C-alpha cells in the first residue's frame, strides 16, 4: 500500500523533502561538486537536521539519484502505458525526449548520463545504480522490439540488442552533447535518427 502524505510520519516527510530539494542540486553539480552548504541552502535545514535523517552525504546522493531517475523512468512509463502498439511504445522514447527540449524536463541534463559520466571511476554505488538503469532500459527496448517482431509490426532483426543499444546511445549522447554545448540540435537530430530507425528501418 502506498502511503499518503497524511499517513507518513514527520521524519518520513522530512526525509522526502530533503530528497526532493537536493535532487536538482546533485543532478546539476554532481556528487563531488555538491557541498553540505549546497544541501542546507537547498533545504533551508541545518546540517544536523539533514544528518538526522540521513547517515551521510552518500545516502542523500543515492536517494536523490533514485528520485531523479524515477522522474525520467516514470515519464516514459506513463507514455508507454497509453500506447496501444509496440511501435507506439518504442516511439515513447522519442516523444519524451523531444518534449524535454520544449518543456525543459531535464534542465540539468539526464541524471542517468550525468551520473555515469561522473561516477564511472569515482563512486561505485552511484555508478552501479546508473548502469543498472541503462541495462534495464536496453532490455525494455529489446522486449518491445521482440514483441513487435512477434506480432508482425517489426521486421525480423538479426541482432535486436544491437538496435536497442544504438537507440540508447543516440538518445543519451544527444542529451549529453545538447546540455554540454547548449546546442539542442544534438538531441533533436538524435531523436530524429531514432524515429527513422523505428519507422523506416525496423517497421515491417
Image (cartoon, helix red, strand yellow):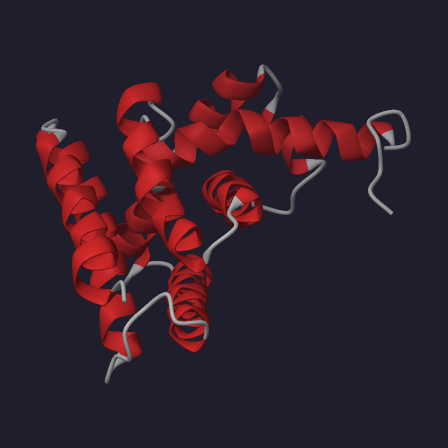
**Residue 108 visible from this viewpoint:** no
Front one among 24 and 42: 24
Name the residue furthest bottom.
158
Q: What residue is drawn where x is 45% and y is 41%?
A: 72
Left or right position of 49 against 80:
right
Front one among 104 and 127: 104
**Residue 193 visible from this viewpoint:** yes
Q: What residue is drawn where x is 33% and y is 30%?
A: 100
User: In the image, residue 87 lies at what x, y percent?
Assistant: 38, 55
Q: Is residue 18 above or below residue 93?
A: above
Q: How many marks?
A: 0
Examine the image and state in which quarter residue 13 appears: top right
Left or right position of 89 against 51:
left
User: In the image, residue 108 lies at what x, y percent?
Assistant: 31, 30
Q: What residue is drawn where x is 39% and y is 64%?
A: 141
Q: Is residue 136 above or below residue 198?
A: below
User: In the image, residue 9 lies at what x, y percent?
Assistant: 87, 32
Left or right position of 150 against 100:
right
Left or right position of 10 against 199:
right
Examine the image and state in which quarter residue 164 appears: bottom left
User: In the image, residue 130 lies at what x, y percent?
Assistant: 41, 58
Q: What residue is drawn where x is 52% and y is 50%?
A: 84
Figure quadrant of the C terminus: bottom left
Q: Is residue 38 above or below residue 94?
A: above
Amino acid at each position: 500500500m502506498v502511503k499518503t502524505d497524511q499517513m507518513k510520519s514527520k521524519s518520513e516527510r522530512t526525509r522526502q523533502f530533503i530528497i526532493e530539494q537536493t535532487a536538482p542540486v546533485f543532478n546539476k553539480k554532481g556528487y563531488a561538486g555538491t557541498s553540505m552548504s549546497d544541501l542546507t541552502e537547498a533545504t533551508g535545514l541545518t546540517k544536523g537536521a539533514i544528518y538526522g535523517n540521513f547517515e551521510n552525504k552518500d545516502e542523500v546522493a543515492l536517494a536523490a539519484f533514485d528520485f531523479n531517475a524515477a522522474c525520467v523512468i516514470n515519464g516514459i512509463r506513463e507514455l508507454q502505458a497509453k500506447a496501444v502498439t509496440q511501435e507506439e511504445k518504442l516511439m515513447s522514447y522519442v516523444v519524451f525526449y523531444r518534449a524535454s527540449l520544449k518543456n525543459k524536463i531535464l534542465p540539468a541534463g539526464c541524471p542517468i548520463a550525468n551520473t555515469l559520466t561522473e561516477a564511472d571511476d569515482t563512486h561505485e554505488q552511484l555508478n552501479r545504480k546508473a548502469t543498472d538503469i541503462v541495462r534495464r532500459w536496453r532490455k525494455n527496448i529489446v522486449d518491445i522490439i521482440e514483441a513487435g517482431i512477434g506480432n508482425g509490426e517489426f521486421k525480423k532483426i538479426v541482432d535486436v540488442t544491437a538496435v536497442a543499444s544504438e537507440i540508447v546511445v543516440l538518445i543519451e549522447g544527444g542529451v549529453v552533447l545538447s546540455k554540454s554545448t547548449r546546442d539542442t540540435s544534438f538531441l533533436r537530430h538524435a531523436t530524429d535518427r531514432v524515429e527513422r530507425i523505428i519507422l523506416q528501418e525496423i517497421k515491417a
